[in-house]
Amino acid sequence: MYDTRRLAVAALLLAGALACANARAQEPVTIGLVVPLSPPGDPTAGQLIRRGAELALDYYNGKGGVLGGRKLQLSVQDSQGRPEGGVAAYRRVVGEDKAVAVTGFFHSSVNIAANEVAKSMGVPTLGTQTSAADITAKHYEVAFRTHLIDPLRVAAWLEFMQKKGFKRVSLLAETSDYGVGLVTETDRQIKEKKLPIELQSLTFDRTSTDLTPQLLQVKAFKPDLLVNVGVGAPMDLMIEQAATLAITPQVPMLVSYDAPIRPQFWQLHPNTGDKLYFIAYYSPKQTLSEIGTWFTKAYEEKYKESPVYSSLNGFGDVAIIAQAVEQAKSTDPKAIIQTLETGKFAFWSSGDVTFPKADGVFWHNFSPPVLILQFQKPGQDWKEAEVVFESGK
């Protein structure tokens, strides 16, 4: 009788343990998404990245999820584009929501700050649209990125300047890790390559609502090109105030990232966007992967417009994390980090993505090609803008 009772109790305990294990096996796998959804960050970029990330969940959950049926879910947090906001958001998605990896980062300063916390908490970060060198140059085990890094961006626009014959260049940059990093790198490469370019570097606080003092200095310098290194509202402000002060269009402007591809660009700049140059990382003429093709179709059906790079990379980064979980056969962050370092991953673009332990800033980094586009007429669809430069060609 005693043995029978012992066996019954053991059976009940085993059944309970199996039930708990089965319940854990069916729990969703959480991916953290830290994006700017309010000022002083760039909320448009945050929403575009979020769109892509959510469609990645649709794609993988529609195929049964990961690890034999576990669904993916997002924990979305607003960084406000502030380093302290990014740190708090990272702590929340990792500490409270148990995210297995965190992506979505748009502002370099936010990504850099979050990496300092990630280094101790051990859950990997994957920068979606952050370019400052220190994100990967510090060689942190937890830090990965799928975006253009500053040295490549600068090398591209310096080559473009050489081809166009621009010899006097004004670079007006915000005092963020992104802006200061690009000023420093541009100056360094001009000196290292002994280029015949006279550079005027000016900075402004990213919360500025009037860039007139700096733009008057630009006007007095009489440059051949003005490089706009503002993000979000400051970028838009510079376009308008440079035109008001009659600097542009006589002096062409190059925007340092791909904000002009956004649907609302011509609503904000109906009379000042013509002939604008801007950096881009994607052209509809590029060949897409199988999942990239799926995403483009799904995005157009849902939002009635073509996807832009921010959404493509938001989708691609969540797709990479999903594949890393599946390849690692685990949600353990250490296993995911090891898999990210050694695996190959499908992305929205053709070809595999890898994160080698490379030298310098190329550590754990995958970079898209650099394109420079130019609008040829007011209201022009960015997909029809002229590609005036492409890195490697």
Image: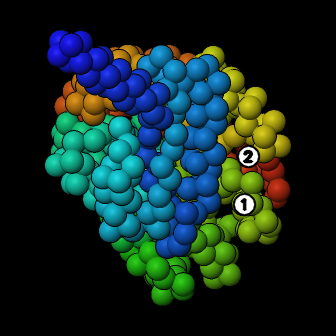
Three-letter residue code for mark 2: Trp
Q: Is residue 348 left or right of residue 244?
A: left
The percent position of residue 382, horizontal first and vertical second, equals: 73, 46
Crowding around mark 1 (Cα neighbors within 10 Å: few <14, some 14 to 19, many 20+) is: some
Q: Are marks 1 and 2 in contact (CB under 8 Å)?
A: yes
When asked about the image quadrant of residue 86, the answer is: bottom left
Tell me, yes or no, if residue 363 can be seen here.
yes
The quadrant of the rendering that contains the N terminus is: top left
Crowding around mark 2 (Cα neighbors within 10 Å: few <14, some 14 to 19, many 20+) is: some
The percent position of residue 102, horizontal first and vertical second, equals: 38, 44
What secondary structure is found at the residue carrying circle 1? helix
The percent position of residue 189, horizontal first and vertical second, equals: 29, 48
Residue at 59% from the left image edge and 27% from the top image edge: 61
- Which residue in the protein does label 1 denote? 265
Q: Is residue 203 left or right of residue 229?
A: left
Distance between the Cα atoms at labels 1 and 2? 10 Å
Which label sits on residue 382? 2
When asked about the image quadrant of residue 321, the answer is: top left
